[in-house]
Image: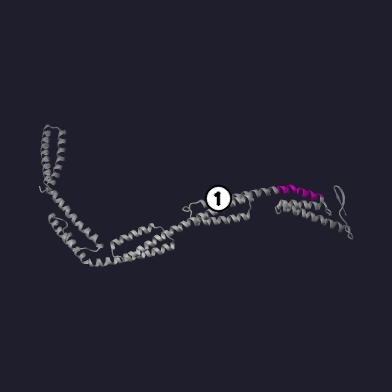
Amino acid sequence: MWLNTGDGERAIGQYPGASEEEALAYFTRKYEDLLAQVALLEQRIELGHVSPADARSQAERLTGTVREANALGDLAALITRLDALGPVIEQRKEAAESARQEERARALESRTALVEEAEALAAVDPERLPWKTSGDRLRELFEDWRRQQRESRLDKRTEDELWKRFSHARTTFDRKRRQHFSALDEQRGLARAAKEALVAEAEALATSTDWAETATAFRDLMGRWKSAGRAARKDDDALWSRFRAAQDTFFGARNAASAEADAKLQDNLVAKEALLAEAEALLPVTDARAARTALRDLHERWEAAGRVPRADLGRLEQRLRAVEHAVRDAEQERWTRSNPQARARAEDAVRQLESTLAALHAQLDKARAAGNARKVSEAEQAIEAREQWLEQARRALHDFGG
C-alpha cells in the first residue's frame, strides 16, 4: 500500500490475504485514529484540560507519530493542524503564567494581611481588646494561614519571611499575656492576703457590744475592703461571705439591743407625746409672755421625761421646734410693738403728714381763688398722695396702740 505525499509516494505497509477494499479500510482506520487523537488534543487545549507543557509534549509526540504513520489519509493536513497548535499552546502558557502571577499576588496580599493583623494584635493594649478576644482571633488567623498555605504556595524566601513575622507576633502576644496574668496572679494574691486580714478583724469584732465604736470600725473595714482590690473570683466570694457574716452578726446583735432598749422607752414616748399635745395647745399664740412661761415649764418636764426610741426622736423634736418658733415669733412681734423709738417715729410721721396736708389744702384754696387750673391739679394730686401715706402711717401707729 502506497501513500502519495508532497515528496512523492511512500510505502505504508502490506495487508496479505485481504482484498483491496479491506486493505484500504484498514489503513484508513489507522488514519482516522490519528485524526481522532489530533481532534481530542485540540479540544483539551481549547477547554484548558491540559497544561501548556503537557500539551506541547503531546503535540510533539503526536507530530512524530503522524509523520511516520503507516496510515491512509491526509497526514499533511494533520501535521498542519498540529503545527497550528504551537501558537495556541504558547498563548495558553502565557495566560497560565499570568494567572499564576495574579494568584501569587493575591496570595501574598492575603498572607501579608494575616501577618499585619497578627502584629497589630500583639501590640494592642489589653484594656482596649481583652486577652481572650485577641487570643481567639490569633487562633483564627493561624488556621487561615494554614488553609492559605495549602491552597497557594509562595516562593520559599517570601514564605519564610512572612512566617517569621507571623510566628514572632504570636510569640510576642503569648509572652505579654503570660506576663499580664502572672502580674494579675500576684496582685490577686496580695488582695487575698489583705482581705484575709480584714476578715480576721471583722470576725474578732463580730461579738463586740461597744455598738458605736465597733460600727465605726466596721465602716473603716469596709473602706479598706473596697480599696484592697480583687482576688480570684472563688477566693473573693468565699472571703466576702465570711466578712459579710461577721458584719451581719454584729449589726444583728446591735439591732436586737436597740429594739430591746426602744421597748423600754415606750413610756417616755407616751409622756412626750402628751407634752407635745400640751405645747401645741398654746397655738396660735395670743399671749407671748404667758406662752413663754408655759413653754419653759414644758421644757423642764420634757427633759425629765427621758430618752425616746431613735425612730421617733426626729418626729417629736420637729413638732416641738414648731411650737418654739411660733412663741419666738410672737415675742418678736410683741417687742416690736412696744418699742418706744419705733412708736415715736410712727407718731412723728403722722404729725408731719397732717401738717403737710394742711399746707396743701391752703395752696389748693389759693389756686382755686386765683383760677389757676394747673396749680389746682397739682395740689389735688399732692393731697391725694399724702392722704394715702397718712392712712398707712396711722395704721402703723395703731399697731403700737396709738
Q: Which residue occupies 37% across, 63% down?
A: 199
Q: Nearer the viewer, residue 167 or 182?
A: 182
Under circle 1, the secondary element is helix
Q: Which residue occupies 39% across, 64% down?
A: 241
Report x, y in % for residue 9: 88, 50
Residue 27 visible in the snapshot: yes
Magenta part mainly helix, strand or loop?
A: helix
Q: Nearer the viewer, residue 135 or 94?
A: 135
Q: Which residue occupies 16% across, 40% down?
A: 385
How has the structure been colored for display? one colour
Report x, y in % for residue 317: 22, 59
Q: Nearer the viewer, residue 188 or 90?
A: 188
Residue 394 visible in the snapshot: no
Indicate the amino acid at tag 1: Glu
In which quadrant will I find the N terminus?
A: bottom right
Q: In the visual, does 28 lie left or right of 320?
A: right
The stretch drawn in magenta includes residue 85: yes
The stretch drawn in magenta includes residue 242: no
Disc 1 designates what residue? 116
